[in-house]
Amino acid sequence: MPPVHPPDTPWVFPEPHLWDPEDDLVAVGADLEPGTLLRAYSRGLFPMPIGPPQDPMGWFSPVRRGVLPLDGLKVSRSLRRSAREFEIRVDTAFDEVIAACGDRRRPDGWITREVRAAYTELHELGWAHSVEAWRDGRLAGGLYGVAIGGLFAGESMFHRERDASKVALMGLVSLLSDEHAHDRVLDVQWQTPHLETLGVQERSRSTYLADLPVALHLPLPAAFEGVPAADDPGEGVDQAR
């Protein structure tokens, strides 16, 4: 089923020419209603808390954006062997995935109760999705993010078993690698040393914003429409219906 469009947001984000060219933080305030989140992502922004829960939300557009080219994922031989032990599923355990990503015992945890509730609502409307790595009937790792047309904005990932989050990323790349793969955008926010080893590259803010409109007008990947798709890492992809 296609995503359900929520009411539009009353909030207006500043235009890119007003953003500080040296600061990733470009706005403060607004709310986490579905319409606000979708407007933000479609303009190259994403939210992240910048203080205690009572403080206003921060909205970021990194000066150097982390993007994973779909033909650039680096998969070692050992990881490819490990991937055969997992099954990739889509949207069968979104609540469990976002809860694990938001575990406050994790270092640098930023997913608050409010953030978790907001993305759960986006998921219920068909905009936020989880890609999960399962082994022996147990959720071993996964990731979640927001899909708008050809944009997949990755938010967070976790693992309970070695390589499970990497295998979920492999599964996501496979799901996005269709006839529109060249113009799809897999956004990971920032390039970290770990993500760099997997092939994540940096793009300038201006390049990212220029690529975004093309991606937004592409069709959703079949897996996020509830259509079964072939999958590299496992025997197949299961979707919730």
Image (tube, rainbow, N blue to C red):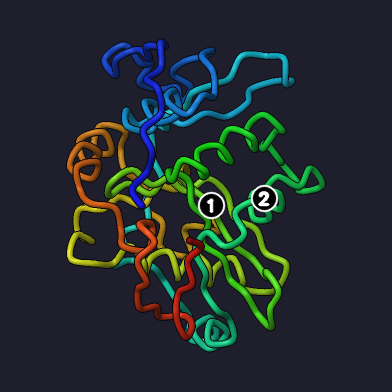
Identified by mark 2, the residue type is: Cys
Q: What residue is at 47 percent from the left and 43 percent from the top?
A: 190
SS for callout 1: strand
From the top left corner, tell me how far across and down residue 204 is, in percent: 30, 37
Of 188 and 5, the residue lying toward us: 5
From the top left corner, tell me how far across and down residue 179 is, in percent: 18, 65
Q: Is residue 145 left or right of residue 5?
A: right
Identified by mark 1, the residue type is: Tyr
Disc nearer the start of the sequence (1/2): 2
SS for callout 2: helix
Q: Are marks 1 and 2 in contact (CB under 8 Å)?
A: yes
Q: What residue is at 68 percent from the left and 55 percent from the top?
A: 96
Q: What residue is at 35 percent from the left and 12 percent from the top?
A: 14
Question: Which residue position holds label 2?
Answer: 101
Gap between marks 1 and 2 measured at Cα:
9 Å
Q: Within the image, what quadrant is residue 94 found in?
A: bottom right
